[in-house]
Image: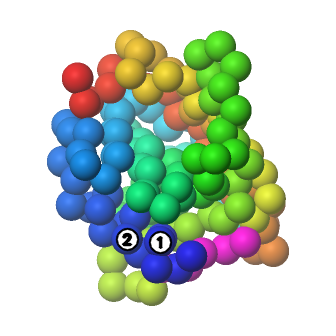
Amino acid sequence: MRLLAAVAALLCLAAPASAQDAQGATSVRGSCTKLVLAGEDAVGSCGGKLTRMTLPDGALFLIFTSGQTMIGFSGRVADEHAQGDETTWPVGFVNIGAPGAEPNAIPARGSCRSGDLNRASAAIVCSATTAQGAFEAAFRSGRSTNR
């Protein structure tokens, strides 16, 4: 899973903010309304961009940023459940990536819920419990940058 986290982090860094690329990445701009990292409030450093990435093996990431650090809530595409315009899935790992540091995949139990990122506005909420504490994020998108 560390390799998947590293691949996701590198692809996210390399992907333009205005593209949906062949790897299955969609980025949206908006506002981060909550970010808790290992139990600590970090909403003040949360970035205005969120990336949803699907890897060829079915791994699914929602990636939030805090400064230059990327926080990915990961699960599996096969575990997604759609209801109306929202999709939910269980989170199995919280992935932390920062420039110059080894990516860290932390086993987790939690879930993510996402509105349709291709709509004008979508709510995205993730929460997970790990041995290092709680990780939570909430984001309200503006318009998808892949249009």
Q: Look at label 1 and name its amino acid.
A: Leu
Image quarter hosting the N terminus: bottom right
Query: Which of these two is toward me, 51 or 99?
Result: 51
Q: Residues within 10 Å of mark 2 (few under 14, many from 20)?
A: some
What residue is shown with label 1?
4
Q: From the viewer's perspective, is 48 left or right of 103? A: left
Q: Does the magenta segment cover residue 53? A: no
x and y, in percent, of residue 57 in the image: 49, 62
For the residues labelled 2 and 1, the Cα–Cα distance comes to 5 Å
Question: Does the residue at mark 2 contact the one at mark 1 (Cβ under 8 Å)?
Answer: yes
| Residue found 41% across the figure and 75% down from its top | 6
On the question of residue 43 being in view, the answer is yes
Magenta stretch: helix, strand or loop mostly? strand
Specify start and end residues of the magenta stretch as a single range. 103-107
x and y, in percent, of residue 79 in the image: 69, 45
On the question of residue 39 being in view, the answer is no
| Residue found 43% across the figure and 57% down from its top | 55
Q: In the rendered image of this protein, does residue 16 appear above or below residue 33?
A: below
What residue is shown with label 2?
7
Looking at the rendering, which quadrant does residue 95 occupy? bottom right
| Residue found 31% across the figure and 53% down from its top | 23
| Residue found 70% across the figure and 19% down from its top | 83
Q: In the rendered image of this protein, does residue 142 appear above or below residue 63?
A: above
Q: Look at label 2 and name its amino acid.
A: Val
Q: Residues within 10 Å of mark 1 (few under 14, many from 20)?
A: some
Q: From the viewer's perspective, is 111 left or right of 7? A: right
Helix, strand or loop status at disc 2? helix
Q: Does the magenta segment cover residue 105? A: yes
x and y, in percent, of residue 102 in the image: 45, 86
